[in-house]
Image (cartoon, grey):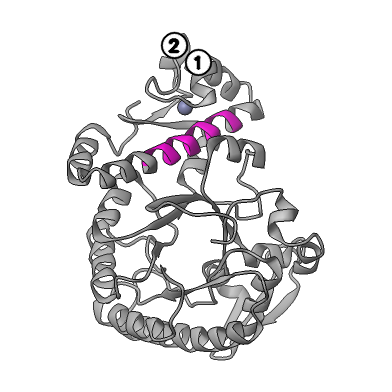
Amino acid sequence: MRSGTVKTPAFFPVATQAAVKGLSARELDEIGIQGLLVNAYHLFLRPGTEIVKAAGGLHEFMGFNKPIITDSGGYQIFSLESLRRVTDEGVEFQSHIDGKRFSLTPQDVIRIQLDLGPEVIVPLYECIKFPSTEDAAQCAAQRTIKWARDSKEYFDKNKSDKVTLFFGIVQGATYAKVREYCVKEISALSPDGIAIGGLSVGEPRDVRHEMLSVVTDTLDKKYLRYFMGYGKPKEILEAIHLGIDLFDCVVPTRFGRTGTAYTDEGKIVVRNALYAKEYAPVDKNCSCYVCRRFTRAYIRHLINANEILAATLLTYHNVFWYHNFLRKVREAIEEGRFLEFKEDFDSTFKEEPCL
Ligand SMILES: [Zn+2]
């Protein structure tokens, strides 16, 4: 990508509003994250695309110089429900900030993203709720495909000198046939990569994995596969096993803000009274700045005293933990021992908080 190479499989933290909540670009650099996911819909509403464009684009605006993916915000627009209307031509919606009405075509959404200037853009898509009927899934997929064609045509005519990649997005809810159809139609547009959307919206884990398998089995191996919006550690390993290359998720940052930390054994709730006198690092195996410098007892105190530093420290550790987790996965793959690594991790890491 324009701002550097991304080693896959990779995990991108989420910076919805052009900020990873609680961390500055200096801290992100220090951790060594490979890139970020930013939401074009949110930035379009606030501060407005023209303000970011006039700053010289997202990287300059944020002071961040690694690869950025922008999501069109299809998921956010469809979550508005009563505030939006959808036609084949595009979406009309009311801003959740000030109630102002907007109408955007798929081409508008590409223009907004080109103005923001990330490395990768994801076109507008229709994301439906779980559970849905097959007819509704087919309709949404059909619309997503039409929008992808309109978007790609506009992108090819208007892409700037900056090298921006166009990722097609596959929908299809929980229906294998619809997913397969969507993969074929979207890859026919020769995108630079494929994003898999419309999952992790409440479907059971086995259904999610079946859908991921359908997509990875149908898709030509040459495409980079990006699973949008999901990232629990064990499921990341399962998805990598199926051939997924890239992930983003709010999990490490959201947990960090709410007082939960990742360790190699599982998550711990640092707020717990158990840690009041525990003068050990958050994770004894972690070499991050927070674990080298602070104790569970101190961070627990910060949480109870409502100090914002608690959120920053735990977010830092969690983002570092994810970064390091993916680094270990890549190492295991390079050394031909991925399955062994996965088995070890599955047996030691507990899904539910340890305490
Ligand atoms: Zn740490």
Q: Position of residue 75 (x, y in %)?
A: 51, 68
Q: Vertical placement of 141 versus 216: above or below?
A: below
In the picture of the structure, the residue carrying the numbered disc 1 is 295
- Magenta span of residues: 312-325
Secondary structure state at the residue bearing disc 2: loop
Confirm whether residue 287 shows in the render.
Answer: yes
Taking the magenta stretch, the answer to whether it contains residue 41 is no
Q: Residue at x 66, y 81 (%)?
A: 108
Mark 1: amino acid: Thr
Q: Are marks 2 and 1 in contact (CB under 8 Å)?
A: yes
Mark 2: amino acid: Glu
Q: Which mark is residue 59?
A: none
Q: Vertical placement of 60 versus 260: above or below?
A: below
Q: Residue at x 62, y 63 (%)?
A: 118
- In the image, taking residue 198 as reference, residue 311 lies left or right, namely right
Specify the principal SS of the magenta part: helix
Secondary structure state at the residue bearing disc 1: loop
Looking at the rendered structure, the number of numbered marks drawn on it comes to: 2
Q: Vertical placement of 7 versus 45: above or below?
A: above
Distance from disc 2 to disc 1, alpha carbons, whole Å, reads 7 Å
Quadrant holding the C terminus: top left
In the picture of the structure, the residue carrying the numbered disc 2 is 278
Q: Residue at x 50, y 77 (%)?
A: 125
Q: Position of residue 144 (x, y in %)?
A: 46, 82
